[in-house]
Amino acid sequence: MAMRQRPMPQKKSNHDDDSVIYKIMAALVMLCVLLVGLQITSRYYSVVGTMFTTQTVLLGVGIASSVLFLASVGLWFYSRRLRPLLHAFSWILGIFFLVVALSCWVLYVTWVSYIPYLYAVYIAVTVLYMIALLYQPEFFLLSCVNVAAGGVFYALSRLYSGRLFVMALYALLVVVIAVVALVVFKARRTDDGILKLGKRSIAIATANTSPLPVYLSCVVWVLCLAVAAFLGSVFAYYCIFAVAAFELAAAVYYTVKLA
């Protein structure tokens, strides 16, 4: 009687780890290119004599980037089953050209007034992307709340007029907080921390972490938002440092839990 041969344990592939490193490097390269482009644009765009020339350049770059974005989308669909490397590369190019196109249209319409906000948006999105790749989904959701709160408080600290825009900022932060709190609550109600969206299941919560930091962050920023409505931009300015401190503490907590 022949002995049944035990299956050899498969060696775990490092392909996924390598892909995360490549994605982070690509995101950092894109961030550097975008920040340098904003710096060059702000240097020439603020001069009245070159304003119209810069606007023409921005219009041309915006149109070209929009066309290249559509070409990248077509390449992404074409290479989805044929060439995996080309498929991933076209996805990265598509995101890059989309960001460049949107930035050019924003600068073309608003001149230089929104350049500081574009700096903040670029850095925040890159940080959130790296957190999504490296940490638990629960920390990513917490970071979304902190980043949204920091952006809203930053805008409120610099805002001197525009009541409608202020109301939009308040509504944005409240919606982000409500969505994140609801997602974490629904995921925590299941035994495995899985959130089901139709036929798709997303792992949100892990067994070794507590939802308290997420709920605490939501409550604190709602209260700070209410106080900022009465005390004004000075209080909103100090809330920015509170957001940074809370995000750093959460990063330490989830890093320890990750280990």
Image: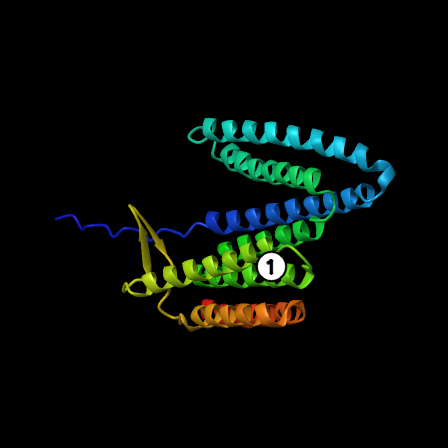
- Name the residue rendered at 47%, 47% in the picture: 15
Residue placed furthest toward the right: 49
Task: State which quadrant residue 128 falls in.
Answer: bottom right
Left or right of residue 118, residue 180 in this image: left
Q: Residues within 10 Å of mark 1 (few under 14, many from 20)?
A: many
Q: Secondary structure at mark 1?
A: helix
So how many labels did they put on this image?
1
Q: Is residue 209 visible?
A: no
Q: Is residue 50 among the parts visible in the rendering?
A: yes
Q: Position of residue 182 (x, y in %)?
A: 37, 61
Apparent side of residue 53 relative to residue 60 in the rendered image (left or right): right
* Residue nearer the viewer, 128 or 230: 230
At horizontal 47% and vertical 29% (from top left) the residue drawn is 79
Nearer-the-camera pick, 185 or 193: 185
Q: Is residue 251 above or below residue 108?
A: below
How far across and down, in percent of the image, does residue 34 sit? 68, 44
Lateral position of residue 214 relative to residue 238, left or right: left
Task: Return the residue at label 1.
Answer: 151
**Spot occupied by residue 127 in the image (x, y as percentages of width and height):** 58, 56
**Near-viewer residue (9 or 119):** 119
Q: Position of residue 157 (x, y in %)?
A: 66, 64
Q: Is residue 245 above or below residue 202?
A: below
Q: Is residue 200 above or below residue 239?
A: above
Q: Tell me how the rendering is colored.
A: rainbow
Task: Give me the residue at 47% from left, 26% from top.
Answer: 78
Residue type, mark 1 in image? Gly
Using the image, determine if residue 128 lies above or below residue 244: above
